[in-house]
Image: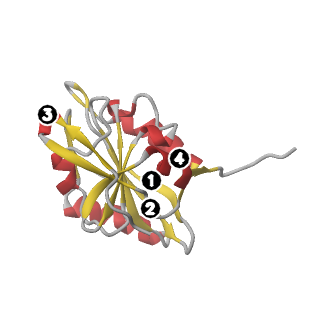
Amino acid sequence: MTRKWTQGIQWPAACRTIRMAPLLGRFGILDSVVDSLERILPTYRGPEGSHEGIALLCGVELPHITLFTTAVFPEADHRRDYVQCSEDQFAAASAVARKSGLGVIAQVHTHPTDSALHSLGDDDMVRPRYEGMLSIVVPAYGRHGLRPLYSLGVHQFQDSTWVLAEHEDVRQNIVIVPTAVDLR
């Protein structure tokens, strides 16, 4: 069920409003994927220090949940305040996913500041995109980890535009799935 935008966040530096909307769907991300993201995203660097990093989340869309099972860290053009994959770099990551019967179904990238909002460039950077796709922004180059997930900027492509999911929707609809549970 969709509903109209409930509120907006003003982004003064970019003079724009970021629309907020309920998250559509339910998502699960394996804890090993979160661990990999927390470990590898902060390692994107250049001679001048930390750079934005990127990962493509691969997985499967099931009837009641989209499950992210794998993070692919592609070759990318990255700088202190920019990261982008070319079509060839994205295609190479997609080929890795397909070999395992998976699809690239979301992307995660870091920002240099504490902001987890899509920048103006992020709106166009995420390609290809499709209805319901997630674009997750991790602040501070990922140095503080990804947990809790609702502390991140979770954006979803809805009605042909990117919207920011409300924190409560992220808390309720994106779960970290354990890869092992010891009940001894």
Residue 169 relative to residue 138: left or right? right
Query: Can you say whether 153 is above or below 50 in the image?
Result: below
The residue indicated by pointer 1 is 71
**Type of amino acid at the residue the image marks with label 3:** Ala
- The secondary structure type at the circle numbered 3 is helix
Residue under the point 23% across and 54% down: 85
The residue indicated by pointer 3 is 13
Q: Which residue is more in the foreground, 101 or 129? A: 129
Labelled disc at residue 171: 4
Residues at marks 4 and 3, CA–CA distance in whole angstroms:
28 Å
Residue under the point 12% across and 40% down: 15
Query: Nearer the observer, disc 4 or disc 2?
Result: 4
Residues at marks 1 and 4, CA–CA distance in whole angstroms:
21 Å
The x, y position of residue 45, in whole percent, is 27, 32
**Type of amino acid at the residue the image marks with label 1:** Ala
Q: Residues within 10 Å of mark 4 (few under 14, many from 20)?
A: few
The first of marks 3 and 1 along the sequence is 3
- The secondary structure type at the circle numbered 1 is strand
The first of marks 1 and 4 along the sequence is 1
Residues at marks 3 and 1, CA–CA distance in whole angstroms:
32 Å
